[in-house]
Every structure is written in C-alpha cells, then in structure tokens.
Amino acid sequence: MTAAQQQVGSVGLNIGIFVAFVLVTLVFVYRASRSNRTASDYYAAGRSFTGSQNGIAISGDYLSAASFLGIAGAIAVNGYDGFLYSIGFLVAWLVALLLVAELLRNTGKFTMGDVLSFRMRQRPVRAAAATSTLVVSFFYLLAQMAGAGGLIALLLQIPNSNRLGQSIVIGVVGVLMIVYVLVGGMKGTTYVQIIKAGLLVVGAAVMTAWVLGKYGLNFSALLGAAVDASPKGEALLAPGLQYTNKLDFISLGLALVLGTAGLPHILMRFYTVPTAKEARNSVVWAIWLIGIFYLFTLVLGYGAAALVGPEAIAAAPGGVNSAAPLLAFRLGGEVLLGLISAIAFATILAVVAGLTITASASFAHDVYANLIKKGEARPQDEVRVARMTALVVGVVAIVGGILVNGINVAFLVALAFAVAASANLPTLLYSLFWKRFNTMGALFSIYGGLASCVLLIVFSPVVSGPKSVILPNGGFDFFPLENPGIVSIPLSFLLGIVGTFVGRRERFNAEKFAEMEVRSLTGAGAEKAVSH
C-alpha cells in the first residue's frame, strides 16, 4: 500500500465536518420535537408533509448506505454485476407505486399491522406483523451499521485489524441514532431525511460531473480506463464476475424488485401525508430522485475502479464499502473527502433513524396498544413504550453491526429485501385484493415466508461459507444460493393460499372486506380523509 492509501485525509478535518453536521441536524430534530404532542405526531408527523416533501424524504430513507457506499464499491470491484443492485432498487418502485402506496395510505393508520388486521382477527395478525417488521428492520439496520463502521474506520484511519476500534465506532453511531429517534420522532427524522437527500443527490452529481470531466465527458473512455485499471480486465463490463450461478442472479433480482413494496420503514412513510393524492405524488418524486441518483452510481463505481483501483479499494479500512470516499479523496483531496463522508454518514443516520422509529412504532402500536392493552392504551403511554423499544432496537443493531462489519452493505440490504418480499408483500397483496383471504392465510404467509427466508440465510454461504466474515469455518452452508428470494418468495405466496384453505371455517366478513375495498380505492374514512 502507498502512503496515500494508508492515510486518507485529515482526521481532524473529518471529525470537524462530522461534528458540524451532527450539531446542525440535532437542532432541526430538537425544533421538530416541540410539536410532538400526540401519537400521530410521533409516528406519522401529524400527517403534515406534502407529497413533494414526503417524496424527498422517501428518497432520503431509501438511498441508504447500500446505495451510496455499497453499490459504488460493488460496481468498482464486480462491474456489471454490481449495477444490478441499482437496476433492481429502482424498478422496485414501480411495484410500490402500482400495488401498495395509495391503497396502504387509505387503509392503515400508523403501521403495516393496521392494514393486515383490518378484516381479520386482530391479536394474531398484529403479532405476526410486528414480528415481521422487527426482523426486516433488524436485517436492514445491520447493513447501515456495517456501512457506518467501514466509513468512519476509513476516516479515522482505524485499520481492519483493529476490530475493537471499529466496534466502538459502530456503537457511537448507534447511540446517535437512538438520540435522533427519542428526541425527534417521525417529524424530526423526516427533516433529517429531506436534508440528507438533497445533500446526497448534489454530492453525487458533483462527483459524477468531476469524474466524467476527467475523461472529456466520454463515458466510453471512463469504461476503458476502468478496464485497464482492473485485474479482471474486460470481464468488468460483462455479467458473471460476482454471480457465476445464474439462479443466484435471478434470486437477487427477485428480492430487489419485490422487496421495496414490503419494507415497513418505506410503507410507514405513506402515513405522513394527508391524502392519497399526496401519497401518489410522494412516489413520483421519489422515483425521479432515486432514478437520477442510480444513474450517478454507474459513473461513481467505474470512476472508483479507474481512478482508485479495485485492489486499493479492497485493501482500505472498510473494504469495498470505501470506494466512494476514496474516489472523493482522489478527486478533491481532504475537503471533498470530508464533505462526501459527512453526506454518507448523514445517509446512514437518516436511514437508521427511520428504521428504528418503524420498529419501535410497530411494537408499541401493534403489540403494546392493541395486544396487551386491547386497544385501550393512552397515546402518551404508547409513545413512551415506543421510545423504550427504540433503545432496545438500537442496542441490538449495534451488536449485529459489529458482527457483520466488513460485508458489502448492498449485499446485506439485498438480504433485508428478500425477508421483506417473503414475509410482507404476499400478505399485503392478498389482504388488499383477495376476498377470501383469512387470518390463517395471513399467519401462514408471514411466519412461513419469514422463517423460510431467515433459515435459508443462516444455512447459506453468507453466514458460514468460506468467504463469510461471520463464521468462515462454520461449514453449515447447505443452501447453495447467497440470496434466498427465489425459494422463499414463491413459498410465501403458496403458504398464503394453503393457510386460507386450512382456515376456511373462519366466517367470511363480506361487510368488512367491502369497507376495506372502498376505503383503499377511494380514501373514504381514512385519517384526514377529504372528499372530492
């Protein structure tokens, strides 16, 4: 390694930019917290955001560490195969727009459990929805914490061999995340996401223009330079570098495309707008911003390959997740590195805050308020339980992040997408569109999809295979694919059908289904509903 690779940027400058950003965002979070008077304020920001504001916040929630750090690194090292993440993450929004966004906003109140239990037995379905939400949020949090560990390790020059130092960094990120959620609730988190989305798109645009400018705005010249700098040569432009198994490639694509419509922290964002029309506007804004950003990742990834080199990226603290910060350092030195890294850090903080508030809201609203208190909990008690849950979720996320530190964050997020697509999406679609779907079908679909997906991940090469950083010598990688989506997603749809026939003795409530259908399609009866 060269001296430049051993020492990237100035530690003092990096820390200064980080502290400045954290202080500024904490001011916004604190100001927002003063208007948190009800459960609706804490969970759904009082449904006070416009479609454009919510769309920017959704893009801030969705463009996670995987999008900025993980995809750039995946493209830099694996070329074409890495870009599949960008394509999958973007196309997934069409599924969310067409099938769930507006219907979910009209039918629910705060959480996914509201929708699933609308015409079924409340207690078992809410318990299943809360379990699924917590597990999906946990997998997604792992990715963000791993990204935070790699990013700050690079900036503070903590080598990969110093696991204790990197673990302390992950702990600090987790504590900050908890503070954002406890103080600001959904409104404070939304403001952070709006700020972060603007910074991320602008920062990525500047770096993209800078990289292309170095090659005379000729993308072909950039690709040629990336091929020359990579030991893999022309293979960087063709499929098959990372996914030699075609089934694994298809499985990953399925998880990415179907996962977004089942992500609880994305679904919960649709409750922060006052009308179904604003929910649709939210998705349109989000698609534009996310689509533009993912075009930037192609240039950033190949730019990192050409200007930094895959070997230097792999050797840096944080490994493959360091590609974008290293590219920033190569382009603009210490100042650009500090700014881009602060944006990446903001990305992680905003996403983990959104995930934590979703997980804590699901437990407090679905389990505490509706199961334990049987719908008679006081709003202030519900919010208090949500805040306590956020503390627990934060601690669990810190421990999990330490365990997976070093794994590509885009890959970890793909696992979260697989769990969301397996456990949540089939049940949501059946609940909204299948008249005869019942409680047993929902339980079969959620628990079956969740269990099969998590078990296949445990017995996959991700956990105990030779390339794993968790248990590299575990030897129980019986399932050959790295992403289980191709098995667990169809299985969950099938189990929903089987469970519905098993539980067919349950009385079909035609009135409740008709109410749900009218409400989901028109918005009549929804919170803050308006007539047109």
Image (cartoon, rainbow, N blue to C red):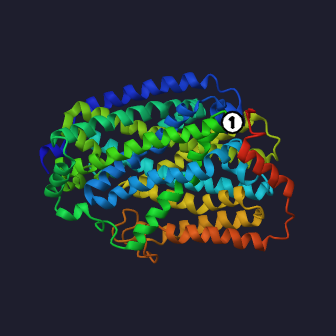
Report which quarter residue 183 is drawn in. Answer: top right
Is 136 left, or right, of 413 in this rendering? right
Q: Is residue 528 above or below residue 293?
A: above
Q: Position of residue 450 (x, y in %)?
A: 60, 64
Q: Position of residue 458 (x, y in %)?
A: 49, 68
Q: Position of residue 415 (x, y in %)?
A: 47, 60
Is 512 left, or right, of 170 in this rendering? right
Neighbourhood count class around disc 1 (C-alpha, 10 Å): few under 14, some 14–19, many 20 upward: many
Query: Which of the two residues, 126 or 118, is positioned nearer the viewer here?
Result: 118
Quarter of the C terminus within the rendering: top right
Which residue corresponds to the image point at 74% horizontal and 36% vertical from the top-left?
A: 527
- Give the structural element (helix, strand or loop) at label 1: helix
Report which quarter residue 156 is drawn in. Answer: top left
Which residue corresponds to the image point at 19% horizontal and 56% vertical from the top-left?
A: 311
Most distant residue in the bottom direction: 478
Report which quarter residue 289 is drawn in. Answer: top left
Which residue corresponds to the image point at 47% horizontal and 40% vertical from the top-left?
A: 59
Q: Which residue is mark 1?
A: 383
Q: Amino acid at mark 1?
A: Val
Is 434 left, or right, of 198 in this rendering? right
Is residue 127 among the parts visible in the rendering? yes
Which residue corresponds to the image point at 70% horizontal and 55% vertical from the top-left?
A: 432
